[in-house]
Image (cartoon, helix red, strand yellow):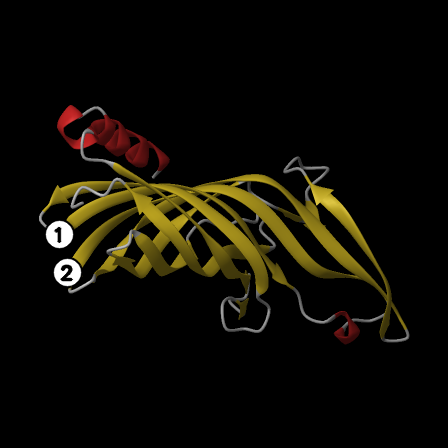
C-alpha cells in the first residue's frame, strides 16, 4: 500500500499542468480514537462507540488537486494522536493494570473527493487509503490495592522490543494503514468544516497475543488558500 501511494503521488506532482492548479489548505481539530482488540479465540472489544475513546488533537496540511469536473484528489500530511482507554482498573485483581495508551503519528490520507456545488458552499464527500508512521507514545498503568486505584505510572513507548511492552507478550507495530472517509463543506469564504473517520487495517500487535487495530473519528475546521475557482 505504501509503494502504491508513493508512485501515485509522484505521477500527480510531476505533472506541471496539475501542479499549476494545486491549492493548499490547513486545518485542525479534535478526534476520538479507540483501539479494537480481538483475541485468538475471536472475542472482540473496543473501537469507536465502546466507551474506551480518547480525546486528542489533530492538524493537517493538505493539497487540493482538481482532476475532472467536481472530482479532486486531496492528499494530506496529518499530525494525530491515537490510542485507547482500557477497561477500568477496578475490574482487575490487585497489582498493576493498563489504563491507557497514546501513540503520536504522522499520517498521510489520500482522499478522492467529489464536490457538489450549492449556493454559497460546496458539499464534499470523499474516501481513500491512509498510511501512518508512529513517532512515539506513552503507556499508563494503575496500581490497584483492595480493588481501588491508589497510584498511576507512565512510561514511554519507543517501538523497540524492550521499550515497547504494552502488556506481557504484546509489542506495538510502528506502521499503520487503512481506509479513511470524509464529509465536509467548503464555504465561499474559503473556510472548510468537516469530519473524517479512519478504519485501521494493520494489526498493531507484533506478537500473536491479540489483533489490535486503530479507529478514529475527527472533526476539523480550516482554510483552503488559492482555490482554483476563485
Left or right, 111 with respect to 152, comes to left
Report the residue at 82% width, 71% height from top: 93
Give the quadrant of residue 95. Answer: bottom right
Left or right, 50 with respect to 26, comes to right
Pointers 2 and 1 in contact (C-beta within 8 Å) = yes
Q: Nearer the viewer, residue 196 or 36?
A: 196
x%, y% of residue 196? 38, 59
State whether residue 187 is above or below residue 68: below
x%, y% of residue 164? 68, 42
Q: Secondary structure at mark 2?
A: strand
Report the residue at 72% width, 39% height from top: 163
Q: State the quadrant of the C terminus.
A: top left
Q: Nearer the viewer, residue 75 or 166?
A: 75
Q: Is there any visible trace of residue 167 in the rendered image?
A: no
Q: Nearer the viewer, residue 49 or 97?
A: 49
Give the numbered dot on residue 117. Answer: 2
Q: CA distance from mark 2 to mark 1?
A: 8 Å
Q: Secondary structure at mark 1?
A: loop
- Label located before the other in sequence (2 or 1): 1
Left or right, 215 with respect to 128, comes to right
Report the residue at 66% width, 65% height from top: 86
Give the numbered dot on residue 70. Answer: 1
Q: State the quadrant of the N terminus.
A: top left
Give the quadrant of residue 227. Answer: top left
Amino acid at each position: 500500500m505504501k509503494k502504491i501511494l508513493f508512485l501515485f503521488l509522484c505521477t500527480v506532482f510531476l505533472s506541471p499542468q496539475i501542479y499549476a492548479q494545486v491549492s493548499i489548505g490547513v486545518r485542525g481539530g479534535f478526534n476520538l480514537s479507540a483501539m479494537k482488540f480481538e483475541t485468538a479465540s475471536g472475542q472482540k472489544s473496543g473501537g469507536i462507540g465502546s466507551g474506551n475513546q480518547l480525546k486528542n488533537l489533530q492538524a493537517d496540511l493538505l493539497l487540493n488537486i482538481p482532476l475532472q469536473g467536481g472530482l479532486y484528489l486531496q492528499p494530506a500530511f496529518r499530525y494525530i494522536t491515537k490510542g485507547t482507554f482500557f477497561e477500568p482498573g477496578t475490574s482487575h485483581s490487585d497489582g498493576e493494570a493498563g489504563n491507557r495508551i497514546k501513540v503520536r503519528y504522522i499520517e498521510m490520507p489520500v482522499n478522492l473527493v467529489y464536490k457538489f456545488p450549492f449556493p454559497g458552499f460546496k458539499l464534499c464527500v470523499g474516501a481513500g487509503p491512509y498510511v501512518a508512521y508512529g513517532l512515539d507514545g506513552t503507556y499508563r498503568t494503575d496500581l490497584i490495592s483492595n480493588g481501588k486505584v491508589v497510584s498511576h505510572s507512565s512510561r514511554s513507548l519507543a517501538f523497540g522490543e524492550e521499550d515497547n511492552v504494552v502488556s506481557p507478550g504484546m509489542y506495538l507495530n510502528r506502521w499503520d494503514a487503512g481506509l479513511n472517509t470524509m464529509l465536509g463543506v467548503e464555504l465561499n469564504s474559503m473556510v472548510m468544516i468537516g469530519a473524517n473517520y479512519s478504519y485501521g487495517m494493520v494489526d498493531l500487535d507484533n506478537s500473536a497475543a491479540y489483533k489490535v487495530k486503530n479507529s478514529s473519528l475527527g472533526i476539523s475546521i480550516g482554510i483552503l488558500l488559492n482555490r482554483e475557482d476563485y
